[in-house]
Amino acid sequence: MRVVALSILITFALACSLPAQSPIPVIVPAATPAVAPKAPSAPANADSAAAVLRSLQEMKTANEETLRKQAATLEQLAELEKVADQIKIYTKRS
């Protein structure tokens, strides 16, 4: 018992005598103001308007394709859920 108490006291004495770390100053860079993005200007001519229309149509097509894929995935998940429910019912009966 004395050995344990003595070793604990020695450990605390050594821990207290160790030099503490000196705090290193932390330099934080100044916050830069956020640059507001410029609003797209109105199309100057018919070519840029046509280009914008084309890009919007491409985005619409891509969005529709994504929605179709998501709908198919949801159907698959619904079918899997039905199968899982059936399996639960069969395992309860067994």
Image: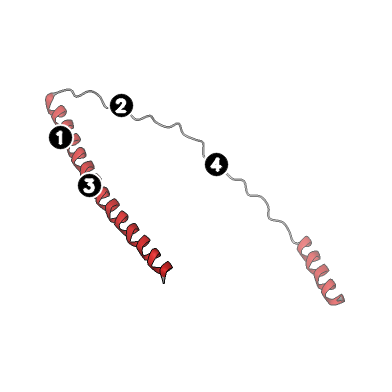
Cα separation between marks 4 and 1: 46 Å
Q: Nearer the viewer, mark 2 or mark 1?
A: 1
Please name the residue that numbered disc 3 is placed on.
68
Task: Name the spot of residue 81 as percent of width and height, x first.
Answer: 34, 57
In the displayed structure, 7 sits above or below 27; it is below
Q: Amino acid at mark 4?
A: Val
Cα separation between marks 3 and 4: 48 Å
Cα separation between marks 4 and 2: 32 Å
The quadrant in which the C terminus is found is bottom left
Instruction: Tell me which residue sits at (30%, 26%) in the image.
Output: 39
Please name the residue that numbered disc 4 is placed on.
28
Instruction: Tell me which residue sits at (82%, 74%) in the image.
Output: 4
Outermost residue, front direction? 93
Q: Nearer the viewer, mark 4 or mark 2?
A: 2
Q: Amino acid at mark 2?
A: Ala
In the displayed structure, 63 sits above or below 42; it is below
Task: Name the spot of residue 23 as percent of width and height, x first.
Answer: 66, 50
- Say whether disc 3 or disc 4 marks the residue closer to the N-terminus: 4
Task: Name the spot of residue 57 as percent of width and height, x first.
Answer: 17, 36
In the displayed structure, 71 sits above or below 14; it is above
Image disc number at residue 39: 2
Task: Name the spot of residue 89 as percent of width and height, x first.
Answer: 39, 64
Image disc number at residue 54: 1
Q: Amino acid at mark 1?
A: Arg
Residues at circles 3 and 4 in contact by the CB criterion of under 8 Å: no
- Say whether disc 2 or disc 1 marks the residue closer to the N-terminus: 2
Cα separation between marks 3 and 2: 32 Å
Cα separation between marks 3 and 1: 21 Å
- Say whether disc 4 or disc 1 marks the residue closer to the N-terminus: 4
- Say whether disc 3 or disc 2 marks the residue closer to the N-terminus: 2
Residues at circles 2 and 1 in contact by the CB criterion of under 8 Å: no
